[in-house]
Amino acid sequence: MTQLDFWYDFASPYAYMAAMRIEKLAAEAGGAGVTVRWRPFIIGPLFKEFGHDLSPVFDNQVKWRYLLADVPRQAAYYGVPMSAARLEGPVPSMLGARVALLLASEEDNLCPAFTRALYQASFAEGRNIAEPEVVAAVLEGMGADARAVIARALTPENKQALKDQVAAAMAAGLFGIPSFTIAAKDNELFWGNDRLEQAIAAASAASIAL
Amino acid sequence: MTQLDFWYDFASPYAYMAAMRIEKLAAEAGGAGVTVRWRPFIIGPLFKEFGHDLSPVFDNQVKWRYLLADVPRQAAYYGVPMSAARLEGPVPSMLGARVALLLASEEDNLCPAFTRALYQASFAEGRNIAEPEVVAAVLEGMGADARAVIARALTPENKQALKDQVAAAMAAGLFGIPSFTIAAKDNELFWGNDRLEQAIAAASAASIAL
């Protein structure tokens, strides 16, 4: 089994599409198989490092207009529900990232299920995932103890863990999301939901070669 | 038949990949069929308009490093030859654009064949297509009267035609290359070689609906 690292931020509609597709594609991969390591983080600090106030998509209104058309079109193409209301501006994604990262560190790893559910709350249902009640409702929907999970997500240790994850993303050469890296192939990097199939194939090929 | 407009600049390796693929994909399209209108232009003036000195890819060294890895990987994926030497910096593409645009306006329309051949000279063979001798050699390889074609490409009328093409690209909402637009669908825009299949499918579907 070769590990494919999946880097995402809850603000990104393209990362949402990748999150809804990646496990099925990994399960269908040939070779010795591909496992997915879910790596939530926040990309804002990277964008700042590269000189952008928010996302670079907001720097060019012409490109931004295109993305407003492309996102629902891509969602339809992949069969992923998309609420028009959600695309009006940046999505504050810090709390979601802290909770997802905490869950990824715990033994029963609820991170993938939580990630999909929180993405759906945001992009399919148009809910504001910056609100703790929305995050709590998603956790409760999964049968988790929402209050306890959020408390653990807000400890100094977990806040530091998110900072470390951001530093790891920077060290991996990331500049956008979603991104995929293959540790077994010298951290080969793929950027974008439309590279997901190629990333899976490359990981699968690596699993044969090793 | 629905027309798909294919917008490209000889500087772009991703547009090169699209140029080598588009006619086959259009020929295989279902519905009432898709015809390709080849629309060479230069994207530099658009990048300037959006505040970049050259291409936005040079604004972020981390992203640029990624593209240096992604371009040969994508070329291999699509089975298109790619010379490593060609990827070191911007490609002056004005002369190629003027010649291609001239050819597209003439009755025997040598534009598609010239475009593919000039892209190959640049990206497959690593030749400097800013040199008139290189452009002339490509034209001669096609059996054209190179000296006469280049002279017609450099008339004030043809220079103005390229300016008009740039203005049309701007009016169409372009911001990157390759791009594809469907006039019959209110100029629906697709950006990137990795959207080419979807653009063909959308044009093909439009040809049924009309």
Image: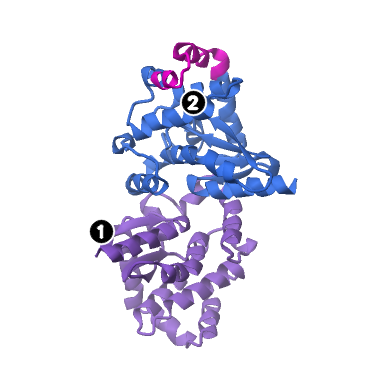
Chain colours: A blue, B purple
Asked if residue B28 is positioned above or below residue B189 in the image, the reply reads: below
* Point 47% across, 88% down: residue: B145
* Point 37% across, 29% down: residue: A121
Q: Residues within 10 Å of mark 1 (few under 14, many from 20)?
A: few
Asked if residue A198 is positioned above or below residue B205 in the image, the reply reads: above
Report x, y in % for residue A128: 34, 26
Disc 1 secondary structure class:
loop
Q: Quadrant of residue B199?
A: bottom left
Which sits in the foreground, A60 or A67?
A67
Residue at mark 2: chain: A
Marks 2 and 1 belong to one chain: no
Mark 1 highlights which residue? B186
Query: Can see residue B88?
Result: no
Asked if residue A133 is positioned above or below residue B53 in the image, the reply reads: above
Predominant secondary structure, magenta span: helix
- Looking at numbered disc 2 in the image, what kind of residue is underneath it? Ala
For this view, does A126 lie left or right of residue A105? left
Residue at mark 1: chain: B
Q: Quadrant of residue A135?
A: top left
- Looking at numbered disc 1 in the image, what kind of residue is underneath it? Asp
Indicate whether residue A142 is drawn in magenta. Answer: yes
* Point 60% across, 63% down: residue: B86
Q: Residues within 10 Å of mark 2 (few under 14, many from 20)?
A: many
Report x, y in % for residue A141: 42, 21
Mark 2 highlights which residue? A97
Report x, y in % for residue A61: 33, 45
Q: CA distance from mark 2 to mark 1?
A: 39 Å
Indicate whether residue B20 is drawn in magenta. Answer: no
For the magenta stretch, what is the residue range?
A137-159
Query: Can see residue A15?
Result: yes
User: Which quadrant of the rendered structure holds the C terminus of chain A?
Assistant: top right
**Tag 2 and tag 1, C-beta contact below 8 Å:** no
